[in-house]
């Protein structure tokens, strides 16, 4: 199990120092996210200021971008880093796609994301192997690629060629809460980012079987895909309060209702959604009971955290990231000990 770190929402000028510290402490990968900042811009700095650290997006919002723009950006980052970049994509939810990004929500989420992945790989195949670009689907028709717009092939390196489609392709992870995207990941992708709003039981009994369906459809095996889990943990009362607040926010999202329903807490999810609609954020954490907290968050003491994480996610996660962001200079010994435990 690889142990990764999450980049906190910081200014670009602060990324180089954090990336260097993450590599020095021993993290396997550093993930960026699309919250307050663009997820790709920090990646150029991570690539420049590290030599061994993998890095990637967890996630970039796919439906806010065209396959071409994603393909070019990922290609440049892979070239810059010698293949250390991992492209992580997520769909977001309808309200954000329509009202924050001003884009159209598709009739079929999995259908459009499938096309995006195949279209991105069509670009990469064209650039790496000289294949004529000719992708035709329900959402995209891509047939124009002249030499003036064709980047150079990726140079051979130990990290290049990890993709499903063959030499030169960049690993693609997709994220999801529900089974449709887990199946798609199993069918097409190198990795699956489990949404932070999860429980080990939900992952084991719902998501992994769905992913296995996709693997069987494409004739692949479990070892052909990497499951990346972001875990809520709490080793202090302050961290417990933080986890309750974040969990109440996620549980209020209608698109994530399946997780609460699975555990029999659908009525609580409805109450949380009603509070969120009114902007009553302070009332929401109080609805997260101790039982819910322990289902979605590992509550333990710091000395037992590493062993408890391994036990909790054994057989589920290939990569593990704590929901707590890594900040250099804060709890460095804590992070070093965790990394040493996962070596």
Image (cartoon, helix red, strand yellow):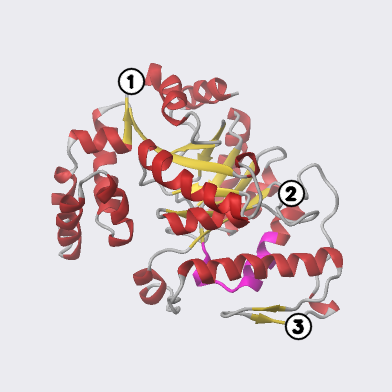
The residue that appears at 49% across and 66% down in the rendered structure is: 110
Q: Is residue 294 above or below residue 150?
A: above
Q: Which element is circle 3 on?
A: loop
Q: From mark 3 to mark 1, how far is it between C-alphas?
A: 57 Å
Q: Position of residue 335 (x, y in %)?
A: 49, 27
Q: From mark 3 to mark 2, how far is it between C-alphas?
A: 26 Å
- Compare marks 3 and 2 and give the one earlier in the sequence: 2
Q: Residues within 10 Å of mark 1 (few under 14, many from 20)?
A: few
Query: Mark 2 = which residue?
Result: 83
User: Is residue 307 covered in magenta?
Assistant: no
Marks 3 and 2 close (CB-CB < 8 Å): no
Q: Position of residue 60 (x, y in %)?
A: 52, 60
Q: Which residues are magenta?
A: 61-74
Q: Which mark identifies residue 249?
A: none
Q: Is residue 289 above or below residue 43?
A: above
Q: Which element is circle 1 on?
A: loop
Query: Mark 1 = which residue?
Result: 301
Marks 3 and 1 close (CB-CB < 8 Å): no
Q: From mark 1 to mark 2, how far is it between C-alphas?
A: 37 Å
Q: Residues within 10 Å of mark 3 (few under 14, many from 20)?
A: few
- Image depth: mark 3 or mark 1 in front: 3
Q: Which mark identifies residue 144?
A: 3
The answer to which quarter of the image holds residue 51 is top right
**Can residue 323 be seen by looking at this rendering?**
no
Q: Is residue 307 left or right of residue 269?
A: right
């Amino acid at each position: 199990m690889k142990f990764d770190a999450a980049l906190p929402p910081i200014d670009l000028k602060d990324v180089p120092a954090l990336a260097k510290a993450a590599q020095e402490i021993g993290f396997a990968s550093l993930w960026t996210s699309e919250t307050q900042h663009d997820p790709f811009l920090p990646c150029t700095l991570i690539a420049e200021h590290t030599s061994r650290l993998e890095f990637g997006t967890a996630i970039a919002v796919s439906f806010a971008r065209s396959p071409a723009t994603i393909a070019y950006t990922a290609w440049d980052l892979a070239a810059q880093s010698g293949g250390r970049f991992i492209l992580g994509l997520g769909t977001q939810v309808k309200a954000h796609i329509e009202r924050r990004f001003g884009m159209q929500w598709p009739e079929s989420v999995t259908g459009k994301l499938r096309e995006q992945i195949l279209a991105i790989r069509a670009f990469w195949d064209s650039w790496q192997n000289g294949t004529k670009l000719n992708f035709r689907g329900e959402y995209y028709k891509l047939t124009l690629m002249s030499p003036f717009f064709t980047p150079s092939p990726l140079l051979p390196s130990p990290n290049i060629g990890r993709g499903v489609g063959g030499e030169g392709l960049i690993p693609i992870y997709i994220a999801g809460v529900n089974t449709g995207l887990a199946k798609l990941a199993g069918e097409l992708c190198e990795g699956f980012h489990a949404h932070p709003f999860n429980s080990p039981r939900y992952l084991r009994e719902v998501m992994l079987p769905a992913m296995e369906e996709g693997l069987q459809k494409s004739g692949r095996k479990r070892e052909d895909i990497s499951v990346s889990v972001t875990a809520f943990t709490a080793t202090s009362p302050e961290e417990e309060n933080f986890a309750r607040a974040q969990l109440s926010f996620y549980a209020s999202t209608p698109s994530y209702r399946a997780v609460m329903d699975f555990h029999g807490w659908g009525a609580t999810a409805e109450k949380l959604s009603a509070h969120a609609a009114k902007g009553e954020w302070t009332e929401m954490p109080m609805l997260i009971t101790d039982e819910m907290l322990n289902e979605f968050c590992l509550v333990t003491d710091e000395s037992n955290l590493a062993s408890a994480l391994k036990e909790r996610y054994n057989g589920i996660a290939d990569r593990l990231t704590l929901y707590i962001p890594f900040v250099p200079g804060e709890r460095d010994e804590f992070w070093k000990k965790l990394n040493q435990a996962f070596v």
